[in-house]
């Protein structure tokens, strides 16, 4: 077969972009070569609808073993009683949970997208806001921390069937025990979506939702540093007190309902090559070197937040407990969109982000979100955070000066050359 020169040329260009640039998108990371190797393996050829030992296709002996190892490692990593590693993405993990637990029209209570929540937690443009009736809690304007009393007040008023905690752009830890107590008062299930801080939670650097929340979902590609994908976990398998039923009308344990909601509920054949890569990533995340890595992610985020504050930037909540921070640029007279565009010209990648109580549209925004998971994988330490913030500040102050931004770009390339990625 003729080699597809065009696509491989573009993939080389993408690798070059990743090598040269400073990757500060909080949801991104760089997987190891062995994770990539597993993701690009022959397991991509295999259909395996069903679960290990219970497939709808022949020839699944090997992928059964791979998936069983992935499940066992994920359970060990998160101290979970039950795991499904098949969701193709974080969004699909959440879709499966909602399909298993809710009926169309049921009320859900999630963290407001414009305060840092995720689309799948009830946004009107997402299935979660179209199929269910969404209500939202947010952060306190004065502190930038979750307003737990407000959360409780809405829960008592609306009596949702599900309370969702977790976020895409919230830099603080969560009080899962409190949220569970509210849920118990109104008879709701709690779903914790730990997509962003999963690696920090797995290694004990943040509160653990598993003892408190009924169901936990995560992506596998952010701080966890695995392939792009999702998973669903239960700290303790439980008989559902709401009498949730399978399509055949049987009341089952939650694990069973969730398995069925993944397949056949929302997906077809699992991506066994990605499940193999997840297994490799889970083993890596259990290692001592990952522990050192994830500690460094947190230290780098703290150092970076402190550097931003010293340059006069306004960080929502004043700092960070995890790997990311949300910066309100309103005192710097530049929109999130203009900042993102200018930084891209200097090969610094961030994403524009709404800030709580934003007066700009989601396409423009007043903020940017920044994370340290990817640069820490490259080997950056606390002392480099000040340099990076200096480069960002230089671009934002001179964003209309093309020549100046190009000079910063050269500095970015000189810096990243010292931290080779895959070469
Ligand atoms: N949940 C949260 C909190 C996220 O931040 C994200 C992605 O950014 C997702 C779910 C969706 O994950 P995916 O992009 O894999 O569908």
Image: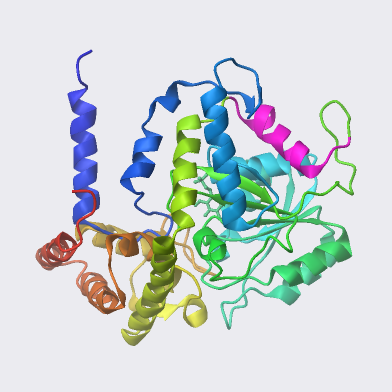
Please tell me whether the stretch drawn in magenta is mainly helix, strand or loop.
helix
Residue 192 sits in quarter: bottom right
Tell me: 159 left or right of 76. right
Residue 39 sits in quarter: top left
Q: Is residue 128 magenta?
A: no
Query: Percent position (x, y) of residue 236?
Result: 76, 53
Query: Percent position (x, y) of residue 50?
Result: 65, 26
In this rendering, the count of numbered labels is 0
In this rendering, the answer to whether 252 lies above or below 391 is above
Tell me: 343 left or right of 68. left
Tell me: 198 left or right of 258. left
* Residue occupying the point 10% across, 66% down: 407
- Span shown in magenta: 251-268
Quadrant of the frame with the N terminus:
top left
In this rendering, the answer to whether 339 lies above or below 105 is below
Q: Is residue 255 magenta?
A: yes
* Residue occupying the point 40% across, 73% down: 301
Residue 130 visible somewhere in the drawing:
no
């Amino acid at each position: 077969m003729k080699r597809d020169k065009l696509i491989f040329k573009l993939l080389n260009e993408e690798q070059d972009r990743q090598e040269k640039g400073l990757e500060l998108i909080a949801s991104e990371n760089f997987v190891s070569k062995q994770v990539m190797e597993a993701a690009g393996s022959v397991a991509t050829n295999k259909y395996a609808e069903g679960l290990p030992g219970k497939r709808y296709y022949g020839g699944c002996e090997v992928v059964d073993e791979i998936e069983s190892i992935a499940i066992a490692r994920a359970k060990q990593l998160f101290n979970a009683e039950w795991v499904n590693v098949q969701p193709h993405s974080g969004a699909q993990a959440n879709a499966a949970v909602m399909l298993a637990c809710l009926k169309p029209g049921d009320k859900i209570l999630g963290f407001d997208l414009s305060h840092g929540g995720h689309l799948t937690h009830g946004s009107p443009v997402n299935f979660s806001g179209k199929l269910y009736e969404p209500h939202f809690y947010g952060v306190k304007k004065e502190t930038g921390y979750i307003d737990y009393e407000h959360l409780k007040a809405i829960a008592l008023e609306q009596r949702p069937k599900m309370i969702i905690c977790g976020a895409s752009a919230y830099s603080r830890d969560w009080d899962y025990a409190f949220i569970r107590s509210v849920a118990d008062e109104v008879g709701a299930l709690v779903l914790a979506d730990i997509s962003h801080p999963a690696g920090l939670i797995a290694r004990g650097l943040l509160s653990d939702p598993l003892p408190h929340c009924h169901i936990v979902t995560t992506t596998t590609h952010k701080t966890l540093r695995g392939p792009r994908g999702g998973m669903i976990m239960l700290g303790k398998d439980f008989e559902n007190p709401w009498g949730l039923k399978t399509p055949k009308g049987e009341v089952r344990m939650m694990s069973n309902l969730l398995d069925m909601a993944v397949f056949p509920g929302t997906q077809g054949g699992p991506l066994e090559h990605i499940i193999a890569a997840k297994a490799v990533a889970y083993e890596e995340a259990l290692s001592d070197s990952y522990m050192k890595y994830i500690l460094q992610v947190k230290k780098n985020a703290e150092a970076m937040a402190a550097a931003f504050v010293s340059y006069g930037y306004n960080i929502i909540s004043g700092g960070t407990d995890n790997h990311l921070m949300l910066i309100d640029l309103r005192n710097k007279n530049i929109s999130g969109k203009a900042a993102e565009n200018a930084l891209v010209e200097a090969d610094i990648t961030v994403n524009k982000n709404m800030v709580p109580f934003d007066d700009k549209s989601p396409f423009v925004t007043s903020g940017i979100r920044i994370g340290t998971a990817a640069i820490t994988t490259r080997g950056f330490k606390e002392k480099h955070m000040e340099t990076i913030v200096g480069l960002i500040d230089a671009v934002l102050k001179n964003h209309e000066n093309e020549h100046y931004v190009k000079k910063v770009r050269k500095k970015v390339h000189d810096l990243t050359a010292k931290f080779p990625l895959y070469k």
